[in-house]
Amino acid sequence: MSITSSHIQPCLWFDDTLEEAARFYTGIFPNSSIGHLSRYAEGGPGEPGSVMAGEFTLDGMTFRGINGGPAFPFTEAVSFSVTCRDQSEVDYYWDSLVDGGQESVCGWLKDRYGLSWQIVPARLYELVTDPDPVRAGAATKAMLGMRRIIVAELEAAADAAGRPHTPG
């Protein structure tokens, strides 16, 4: 493999679950695949044949990963945000990624590998930046009380607080 130009690429540190995680993620996102996986040879430091490092692509974005051991687990200090078109997309990504993981608040979750995700409907951005500060504040307050973001509840809160917004 040769790199023809400079680019930024996330690299994720897994304990020893890189291959399993790559299969999990590529099964969720469209336009995804597992690329090259480097395996340890005799002489280690890992078990011969086990995955040392590799690449996988999620919806066109390539990630590198390493099986570096338990020294550096994921934290919420880094997360990946998935902007969704509608509630059905929010529900799909939320249900898929939280399976075996843990719900958090405001559209955040941790997956089964401890990686944090933000599952965010595009409508949330529209509502919390509404030119009417009363509507924007009501939508923000509603979001702060949610785990999974529910678009209809955000819209209802904004509409109850101010003049209903007419897309235009």
Image (tube, rainbow, N blue to C red):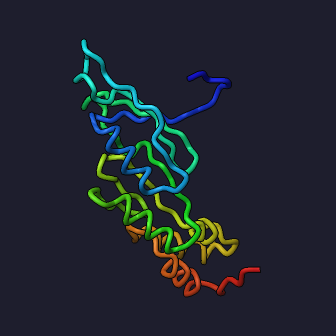
Q: Quadrant of residue 22?
A: top left
Whether residue 128 sits left or right of residue 90 in the image: it is right
Q: Is residue 4 above or below residue 19?
A: above
Q: Quadrant of residue 9?
A: top right
Q: Is residue 98 above or below residue 33?
A: below
- Could you tell me which quadrant the C terminus lies in? bottom right
Whether residue 100 sits left or right of residue 29 in the image: it is left
Q: Residue at x 65, y 25 (%)?
A: 6
Q: Residue at x 55, y 72 (%)?
A: 86
Q: Residue furthest right?
A: 168
Q: Is residue 129 above or below residue 42?
A: below
Q: Residue furthest top?
A: 43
* Residue 52 % position (x, y): 34, 26
Q: Residue at x 34, y 60 (%)?
A: 98
Q: Residue at x 60, y 77 (%)?
A: 135
* Residue 166 % position (x, y): 71, 84
Q: How many marks?
A: 0
- Could you tell me which quadrant the N terminus lies in? top right
Whether residue 23 sits left or right of residue 162 in the image: it is left
Q: Is residue 50 above or below residue 75?
A: above
Q: Quadrant of residue 163?
A: bottom right
* Residue 15 % position (x, y): 27, 34
Q: Residue furthest left?
A: 47
Residue closest to the eye, 135 or 1: 1
* Residue 91 % position (x, y): 44, 70
